[in-house]
Image: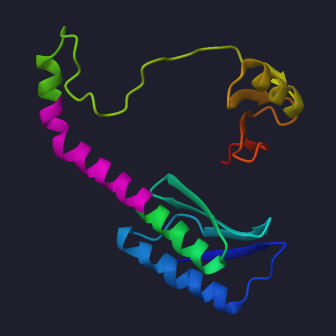
Amino acid sequence: MNIQVHGDHLGVTPALHDFVDKKLGRLEKYFDAPPEREISVTMSVERGMHKVEVMLQLHGVLFRAEESSEDMYTSIDLVVDKLEQQIHRHKTKLNQRFRNQGLRTRVREDFIGGSRSPDESEPRVVRTKRFPIKPMDIEEAMMQMDLLGHDFYVFRNAESEEVNVIYRRKGGDYGLIEPQY
């Protein structure tokens, strides 16, 4: 595994780097092949809290987890536990979908015309929205999002001509999602 550990205004000691390597090694049992990209680990200290953020891509799916605590080692443990839960949940859903795929097709055909879905417990798309995407700068997109009262807003970035998403983060700041090809 290729693990890149970064400190955001923080020096990453060899002991911290080794601890991250050891803890992320626990996730290898979920890999059929190594992750497509390097695993990115960012550590920082904000308002006395030790924050760790980890991003990894596995089989085309991006997993991200972030945890904070009063100790960096505890934060690393917590973020790896969260990633392990995400990966396990994702693999379980995939395995369940493949295992039941033939049965579900038959069940859905039997329920055509009925008002109940045979698998109500599974999340599904219940609404689709279509809207024109006009070019705008990031500040205008933030204003549009606030005016609508949403937590995210999809727009075409006037500078890059790419479709971007602006979203509100937990602390009240904003995040920007840009496509990477």
Query: In the rendered structure, does residue 84 fall within the stretch colored magenta?
Result: no
Q: Residue 56 at what x, y percent from top left?
A: 55, 62
Q: Is 166 positioned to the left or the right of 83 in the image? A: right
Nearer to me, 94 or 173:
173
Residue segment shown in magenta = 85-104
The answer to whether residue 104 is left or right of residue 140 is left
The residue at the point 68 percent across, 76 percent down is: 5
Position of residue 167 relative to residue 113, above or below, is below
74 is higher (above) or lower (below) than 17:
above
Q: Is residue 162 left or right of residue 36?
A: right
- Please report the residue visible at 28 percent of the width from the left and 33 percent of the height from the top: 121
94 is within the stretch colored magenta: yes
Q: Where in the figure is residue 82, as x and y percent of width and height?
A: 48, 62
At x 70%, y 14%, the residue is 132
Q: Position of residue 127 (x, y in %)?
A: 47, 17
Quadrant of the image occupied by residue 97: top left
User: Which secondary structure dominates the residues rendered in magenta?
Assistant: helix
Outermost residue toward the top in this view: 113
Depth check: 26 or 76 in front?
A: 76
